[in-house]
Amino acid sequence: MRWINETDPVVGNPGISFESANEDKTIYLITDDDAENLERWLKKNYMILFEQELEEWYVDETLWPNNRNRKMFNEWIEIECHSVILDTVGGRITDDET
């Protein structure tokens, strides 16, 4: 969280905590095969995920940390795999950004 708080400091604000930064997590859907071979999938896709997560904080890439690598990804990003997703709405799924 140091990166977020140093990039956009707010006077008089203690900053963003790890807990508050993780209140609303992003979910990525992958195939069953990729989930069964998650480490292999992450090896190929970690940078895409990392940059997507950074963009959620700042769209200006010049504010992103330099020297992004798998070690940093592992320290900053927590990966959880879940095999069941239930759609309780039953309606059409749309992208709210398009």
Image: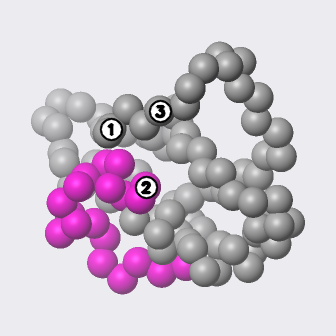
User: For the point 55% across and 79% down, which residue is it?
Assistant: 70
Q: How far apart are marks 1 and 2 (CA)?
A: 16 Å
Q: Where residue 79 sits: x, y (%)? A: 67, 56
| Upstream in sequence: badge 2 or badge 3 | 2
- In the picture provided, is 43 more to the left or to the right than 2? right
Asked if 57 appears above or below 67 in the picture, the reply is above
Residue carrying label 2? 53
Which three-letter amino acid code belongs to the residue tagged 3? Thr
Q: How far apart are marks 2 and 3 (CA)?
A: 21 Å
Tell me the quarter of the image containing the C terminus. top left
Residue carrying label 1? 97
Q: How far apart are marks 1 and 3 (CA)?
A: 9 Å
Q: Quick one: 19 or 54, which is closer to the camera?
A: 54
Q: Judge the density around disc 2: few (<14), some (14-19), many (≥20) Cα neighbours within 10 Å.
A: some
Which three-letter amino acid code belongs to the residue tagged 2? Glu
Q: Where residue 71 sits: x, y (%)? A: 56, 78
Q: Quick one: 41 or 94, which is closer to the camera?
A: 94
Residue carrying label 3? 94
Q: Is residue 33 magenta?
A: no
Q: Quick one: 46 or 76, which is closer to the camera?
A: 46
What is the span of residues highlighted in magenta in the rendered image?
52-71
